[in-house]
Amino acid sequence: MSKRILVIGAGFAGMWSALAAARLLDQADRNDVEIALVAPAPELHVRPRLYEQNPAGMKAPLQDIFRAVGVKFIQGLVERIDVAAREVEVQGTGADASRQTLGYDRLVLAAGSRLFRPAIPGLDAHAFNVDQIADAAQLEAHIATLAQRPASQARHTVVVAGGGFTGIETAAEMPARLRAALGDDAPVRVIVVERNPELGPDLGAGPRPVITQALSELGVTWKLGSGVASVDADGVTLESGERIAAATVVWTAGARASALTAQIPAERDAFGRLHVDSYLRVKGVDAVFATGDVAYAAVDDAGNFAMMSCQHAMNLGRSAGHNVAADLLDVAPIPYSQPKYVTCLDLGPWGAVYTEGWDRQVKLVGAEAKALKTKINTEWIYPPSADRAEALASADPLRIVVA
């Protein structure tokens, strides 16, 4: 191969970048360009579902799809990016644990995001989270062992730190999961702690009445206006000084872009995302594209920017993959645009709430919204089949998936 497109990351944005690049190369009948993707494993981790039970099963294999479309998979972790030399250094994570340096002609950074963990005393040692599969599985294992402890208010209590999207979805699941572990008659308490004055501050006022109704009917309560000051083995202390006894604390408060963005000499936003142009090229850096959770990308002409979400990562990936190949082939790129924005928030056994628009106008609630959420979580966000024609067709950058 005389040219190489290198994709870093096998999440939603990385997978779709590789498939979209392969699609354009196939259309151009070019076989002189290698698409290589580097990730710790050839699998898509379905992070939007990690608040659910059985998180260890929330992954989908990718190797057959990559083989079908001609993407080379390289198992490893990228530790260094040198944009001047156009190369990356990879530490192998599979059977071959050697280090190697890979050159590239075009780079797509799709390394995703990680949970933000501020320097709160005891947070790392005592709090659980649902950010990665291993983390969510650790929480599930912990809940299963609670019945072995002596009965106490702490044993029966889960504190969810953060009242945003992930925090609300996690909290809505917890009453049923605790009762499954401790018995139907256990006096369970699930408390959401949110430092802002409103629950779901980023979700806005539109769906809030539905959210508060659902959580109340599920038995979830919340404390607003004071964040977590410290965590220990027996509970949390809030910034207000209030103490909550809890054997289970789940931290859900925010995410930050992959630390690899710091190795790209370009402007970043407060979340570490790289500023990109309408074609997802990193501004001021030759041959580097950013997509998914590492890209600060405008979705429309009205001043809205992509969220760090699966919804945006899928289309960001398709656009980045198409445009990185277009750049290498010297053909016209297609500007990224995703003006329609929706949310579908899972509210556990109660149902869900579905909204449309950046002002989040409620369109569906309860069981009807839950049916949509189930379809999203179990069908829409999963990879295509390993059929070459189907996989390439699904990677069309103009095929907008809003949820």
Image (spheres, grey):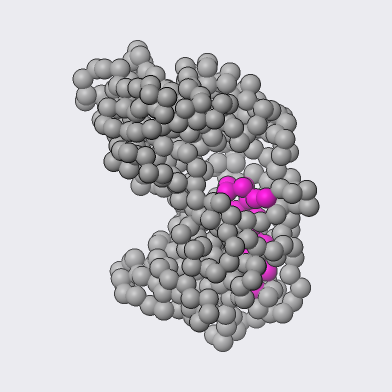
Q: Is residue 244 above or below residue 103?
A: above
The rendered magenta stretch, by its main secondary structure, is classed as helix
Residue in the foreground of this view, choosing between 31 and 210? 210
* Above or below for 306 versus 2: above
Residue 50: quarter of image: top left
Q: Position of 62 compared to 3: left or right?
A: left
Residue at image position (65%, 78%) is 328
Toward the front, the furthest residue is 240
Determine the residue positioned at 40% across, 68% down. Answer: 79
Q: Nearer the viewer, residue 135 or 299?
A: 299
- The answer to if 333 sits in the magenta stretch is no
Res. 202 in view:
yes
Q: Examine the rendered structure and indicate whether residue 3 appears above or below residue 356.
A: below
Residue 35 vertical placement versus 221 (above, below)? below
Q: 373 or 155: nearer the eye?
A: 155
Task: Pick the quarter of the image with the C terminus.
Answer: top right
Q: Position of residue 93 (x, y in %)?
A: 34, 66
- Residue 99 shown left or right of residue 19 in the figure: left
Residue displayed at 72% across by 35% down: 359
Is residue 35 visible in the rendered image? The answer is no
- Residue 336: quadrant of the picture: bottom right
> What span is colored magenta in the figure?
305-325
